[in-house]
């Protein structure tokens, strides 16, 4: 479930604005952690209305300050740091696909609010709602609490600062009016709404703790007149926690665009937990509590454990991980040596380069091998491999060739560049790694100058080790910070050798990122001039920039890139005199 309902920030962020523009009443449900997020994201009720089938579900997720604070055992007084809030937000975003509205409290001072807007927008949040009270605020529904409103012009300045730093039109800042909560009245609420709208706010939320919806309906009536007078159209939001008898149809007819059910999942969970705890204490056993609890298998299904079990079975029944070798391009760097044949068909000590690659793979139990061809495809020959043609190889890069074989990636795969020879043992080590994305990188680039005439895929490790102190190297810490051909050599910690492994999750991340780039990017992307020149390293860097972890397997030599004519001479010298499993080159 958690892998089925996910989306990229760019795909999620604009959904809520689109729903509002389409005239749809957006229905949002509170979430305070991952599993409540899954519920808000997936729960639905189905029925019929006459002869028509009807399906009701929530359109968005409300990440509430109250429920986030209460879930952590703290009062709702802005005592929880924004970074802690952001952790919860990302926890929910990771397992959902619907748009998110975040309760931003007062937003802090204008400087803090700028950073809040920037981080929320980057995460893929659609809306932040900030209330016009003085920091630190008190919860609006707390009886007898002193509610101090911010000067409206000071608050409007904060809105302007927030709007100035946002990077897309998809993100929205909505002002939450607390006049009816603080007792300053309808006129003050409307005056504040006008000031905030003129400051550029994207919408207004009117809050009330009255059990009678009359005052929010009155505000909605005046708000329509205000919008008409100002000549603007901005959505109106309500939170019917106390005036809970009013139906959504009435709210929509009154002019509301978004209705938020702000704290119900946590309140329901709290009541159920108290009852369950008392039942266990009363009976001195947990048998009677079972009727109050969901079956464990339902929890497993919701969070994706059953899906993991199924994938594990698939993995156990198919240990032969597919290997994909993108080999469609020609080899201009080889000059006349490979002018009329693919690089993979070059002779290395009596065998083709491709056959030597296949031997290294077969030794490690890898027999499901797909080679993507293009240039002089009719010359590509080898036993026990699958050939796929990329007729458009001149219009793309190795990434485009690689994705021609996406049907063989589903359960994870290994990618091997067509001009790389590696020690058998390196592949064996790669097979032992469990991370979702693992690149094989060589650290010897730190100890010698780049080879003239070769284009190196430089790598900068995110975990730069301090030589002056003792360090324990954990695989999970070996992540890539930068990768590309234009990185300054003196900054590089490693060189990518052209060998990588992707888990099923890594495959999803790879394809999802590539398709999003194709759909949304024009012109320069990472180091590429355009998407037709988009390389594998560009795609990996784009994934890193989006927050995906890319790990590496560190080696020291043990591989050879057949890129120049002299590389063939070196390989011919090595293979007759050494077992290929002992190949060691610089």
Image (cartoon, helix red, strand yellow):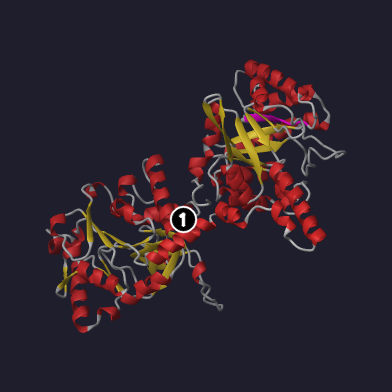
Where residue 371 sits: x, y (%)? 24, 59
The part of the chain drawn in magenta is 203-208
Q: Name the residue nearer the viewer: 492 or 500.
A: 500
Determine the secondary structure under disc 1: helix
Q: Name the residue nearer the viewer: 75 or 107.
A: 75
Q: Is residue 116 above or below residue 169?
A: below
**Visible in this render: residue 549?**
no
Tell which residue pokes out farthest to the right in this image: 144
Where residue 58 sits: x, y (%)? 59, 37
Where residue 174 sits: x, y (%)? 65, 33
Where residue 136 sits: x, y (%)? 78, 44
Instruction: Tell me the quarter of the picture where residue 290 sits.
Output: bottom right
Instruction: Tell me the quarter of the picture where residue 185 sits.
Output: top right
**Visible in this render: residue 539?**
yes
**Main secondary structure found in the magenta portion:** strand
Q: Which residue sits at x=47%, y=53%?
A: 545
**Left/right of residue 90 with respect to residue 322 in the rendered view:** right
**Left/right of residue 81 with respect to residue 61 in the rendered view:** right
**Left/right of residue 341 with respect to residue 27 in the rendered view:** left
**Left/right of residue 6 with respect to residue 149 in the rendered view:** left
Q: Is residue 400 magenta?
A: no
> Dot 1 surroundings within 10 Å: few (below 14), some, or many (20 or more)?
some
Question: What is the count of numbered marks?
Answer: 1
Q: Which residue sits at x=77%, y=23%?
A: 215
Which residue was labeled with disc 1? Answer: 544
């Amino acid at each position: 479930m958690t892998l089925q309902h996910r989306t990229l920030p760019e795909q999620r962020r604009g959904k809520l604005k689109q729903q509002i523009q389409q005239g749809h009443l957006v229905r949002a449900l509170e979430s305070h952690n991952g599993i409540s997020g899954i519920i808000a994201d997936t729960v639905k009720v189905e029925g019929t209305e006459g002869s028509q089938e009807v399906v009701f579900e929530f359109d968005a997720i409300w990440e509430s300050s109250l429920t986030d604070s209460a879930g952590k055992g703290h009062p709702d007084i802005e005592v929880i740091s924004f970074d802690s809030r952001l952790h919860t937000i990302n926890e929910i975003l990771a397992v959902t696909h619907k748009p998110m509205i975040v309760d931003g409290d007062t937003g802090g001072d204008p400087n803090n609010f700028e950073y809040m807007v920037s981080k929320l927008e980057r995460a893929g949040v659609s809306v932040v709602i900030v209330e016009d009270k003085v920091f630190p605020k008190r919860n609006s529904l707390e009886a007898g609490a002193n509610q101090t409103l911010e000067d409206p012009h000071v608050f409007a300045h904060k809105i302007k600062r927030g709007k100035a730093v946002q990077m897309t039109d998809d993100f929205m800042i909505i002002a939450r009016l607390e006049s009816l909560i603080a007792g300053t009245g309808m006129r003050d609420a409307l005056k504040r709404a006008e000031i905030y709208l003129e400051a550029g706010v994207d919408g207004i939320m009117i809050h009330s703790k009255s059990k009678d919806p009359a005052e929010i309906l009155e505000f909605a009536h005046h708000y329509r007149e205000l919008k008409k007078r100002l000549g603007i159209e901005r959505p109106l939001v309500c939170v019917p926690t106390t005036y809970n008898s009013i139906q959504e149809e009435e709210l929509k007819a009154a002019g509301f665009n978004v209705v938020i059910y702000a704290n119900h999942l946590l309140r329901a969970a709290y009541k159920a937990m108290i009852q369950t705890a008392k039942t266990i204490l009363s009976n001195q056993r947990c048998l009677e509590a079972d009727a109050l609890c969901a079956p464990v298998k339902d929890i497993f299904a919701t969070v994706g454990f059953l899906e993991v079990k199924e994938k594990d079975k698939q993995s156990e029944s198919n240990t032969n991980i597919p290997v994909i070798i993108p080999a469609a391009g020609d080899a201009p760097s080889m000059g006349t040596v490979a002018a009329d044949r693919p690089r993979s068909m070059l002779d290395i000590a009596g065998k083709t380069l491709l056959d030597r690659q296949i031997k290294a793979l077969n030794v490690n139990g890898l027999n499901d091998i797909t080679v993507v061809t293009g240039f002089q495809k009719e010359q590509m020959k080898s036993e026990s491999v699958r050939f796929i043609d990329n007729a458009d190889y001149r219009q793309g890069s190795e990434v485009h060739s690689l994705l021609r074989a996406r049907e063989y990636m589903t359960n994870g795969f290994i990618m091997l560049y067509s001009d790389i020879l590696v020690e058998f043992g390196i592949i064996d080590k790669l097979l032992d790694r469990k991370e979702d994305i693992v690149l094989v990188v060589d650290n010897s680039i730190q100890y010698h100058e780049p080879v003239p005439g070769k284009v190196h895929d430089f790598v900068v490790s995110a975990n730069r080790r301090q030589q002056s102190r003792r360090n324990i190297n954990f695989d999970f810490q070996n992540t890539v910070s930068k990768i590309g051909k234009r990185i300054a050599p003196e900054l590089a910690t490693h060189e990518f050798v052209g060998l990588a492994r992707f888990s099923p999750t890594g495959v999803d991340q790879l394809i999802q990122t590539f398709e999003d780039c194709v759909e949304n990017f024009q012109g320069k992307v990472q180091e590429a001039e355009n998407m037709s020149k988009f390389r594998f390293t560009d795609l990996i860097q784009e994934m890193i920039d989006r927050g995906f972890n890319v790990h590496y397997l560190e080696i020291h030599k043990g591989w050879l890139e057949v890129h120049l004519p002299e590389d063939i001479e070196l390989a011919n010298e090595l293979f007759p005199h050494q077992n290929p499993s002992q190949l060691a080159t610089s």
